[in-house]
Image: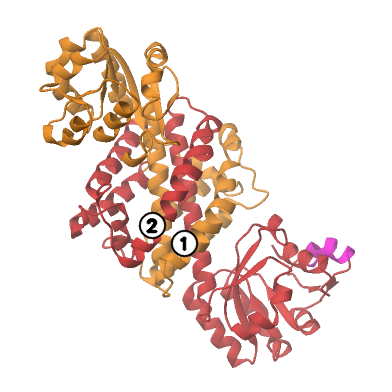
Chain colours: A red, B orange
Amino acid sequence: MGLALAGALADRGHTTTVWNRTPEKADGLVANGVHRAGSVAEAASASPVTIMCLKDYGTMYDVFDSARDALKGRVLVNLNSGTPKEARAAVAWAAEHGIAYLDGAIMVPPPLVGQPGSVFLYSGSRDVFDEHRATLAGMGDPRYLGSEPELAVLYNTALLEMMYATMNGYLHATAMVGTAGVSAVEFAELAVGWFMPTVLGPMVAEEAPGLDEGTYPGDLGTLEMNLNALEHITRTSEEQGVHTGQPRLMQEIAAQAVAEGYGGNNYLAVFEVLKKAPRTR
Amino acid sequence: MGLALAGALADRGHTTTVWNRTPEKADGLVANGVHRAGSVAEAASASPVTIMCLKDYGTMYDVFDSARDALKGRVLVNLNSGTPKEARAAVAWAAEHGIAYLDGAIMVPPPLVGQPGSVFLYSGSRDVFDEHRATLAGMGDPRYLGSEPELAVLYNTALLEMMYATMNGYLHATAMVGTAGVSAVEFAELAVGWFMPTVLGPMVAEEAPGLDEGTYPGDLGTLEMNLNALEHITRTSEEQGVHTGQPRLMQEIAAQAVAEGYGGNNYLAVFEVLKKAPRTR
């Protein structure tokens, strides 16, 4: 990812200096005119803005401990993932050391960085964002979410979860039809070619206002009916010998919502269960 | 759903006779020229094709036990959901009683029946499907999946699972950002307006051939990295006080795939775990 970020910035004519724990990873960039720093402090001193993408916040403190003085009065943009608590702690750490700080999240895989459709999320200091917007735009469309520093990592985590849940749903469904000899390519034609964009996408899109209002009218179908369908999915998974964890969990969550009195509401009422910490596990 | 099916057929000029356990449910249809039968046998005798939509296969046997003679030599189209085993048993039951039988599944909610974009899946007897295709087309685009009778219910169950998994992923993600005061409408703008169609849809669409081949090249990212991301999602869910069941389950499944030697493959290798019965639960 670091290669992709530095490459995108250099391609747009920004003077770019890179540092990586494994220096030779930058050989290709250096051949294209990017500067290679011998230390983190040297890299941080070379530019008004330092963009970092590391494994996590703990690694950030380790790596930048030696470069705190170099960063003083400069801007540090953090693109690694973390938790909201970690994002807030990083803002305090930066303030303590006189570093202007912005938290961000990369929403595309490395090959799409700098390409049309690339989106980067940012939160925290509006001033830092506005002042360096043009630089940030070199990597992808920069979207500012608000002054709460945790917004970027929280959005990132939430969107990742959507991605994994959707992917797991698709894969488990593919495993299910596979038990009757249907190939993944054949199933994808209907599941991804028709169902996802035509039925699923619009259905999800319409739900948001009801979630904010906490109203889940059951006039087009009730959670009781959905629970029946989920039990059915679990039973079919058992019968076909595929994994049952996912349908069983969804069934448990729906059953809890029914037990809490939402049986006559629509399926979205499971939101009331998902908003809370789990009772058991 | 029965009302929607009968209404769509009658609207297209088919002579339609209905039966429901609660006769007055058909008052609106009857006012529009649909015939109301006093018994299941009377309804079955009235037409060459009987279309049924009940809670499950058990209910089908209860309801049609009294109409077996009336159905002899006629066609019964079953649109309720069930398991593959139940679908195969129903074919045997129909054959035993001299009933031509087709299994199907409705892929749209009642308001979309008969509308453009409505899709119905069928499997089993190709002859029955071909002969009555025009009648079936009155309810929605009829798609024939193959001669194995369980294909319609299995596709239906698999697509439903995709729907629930995607919906749960979206709802849990909305709960997650909600902890920082982000409204569902605000989150949907990015999550459903941009992420789902632009990133998620195409990503899922590209995966099918790899699943059939069982090849999961890790060159753009490995399952080890994804496991790290899933642990992170679980940790953030805990920290924010929302439900943790879903990210934790996905983490467990990914961890099992890593334990089975797929750590250097890409995320899709979890398919190898999902294809099998679970080890514990």
Residue A9, quarter of the rendered image: bottom right
In this view, the residue in front, B184 or A105, is B184
User: From the image, which quarter does the C terminus of chain A lie in?
Assistant: bottom left
Amino acid type of the residue tagged 1 in the rendering: Ala
Span highlighted in magenta in the image? A23-32
| Chain under disc 2 | A
Q: What is the magenta segment's predominant secondary structure?
A: helix
Q: Residue at x 65, y 88 (%)?
A: A99
Where does residue A97 sit, x and y in percent of width and height? 63, 91
Q: Residue at x 14, y 21 (%)?
A: B40
Work out whether residue A53 can be spotted.
yes
Q: Is residue B198 above or below residue B188?
A: above
Question: Left or right: B258 with respect to B124?
Answer: right
Where does residue A126 sit, x and y in percent of width and height? 60, 83
For mark 1, give the secondary structure. Answer: helix
Amino acid type of the residue tagged 2 in the rendering: Glu
Question: Left or right: B85 with respect to A131?
Answer: left
Please give the residue where the numbered disc 2 appears in the rendered image: A207
User: From the image, which quarter does the N terminus of chain A lie in?
Assistant: bottom right
Q: Residue at x 47, y 49 (%)?
A: A201
Please give the residue where the numbered disc 1 appears in the rendered image: B188
In this view, the residue in front, A194 or B85, is A194
Residue A24 part of the magenta segment: yes
| Chain under disc 1 | B
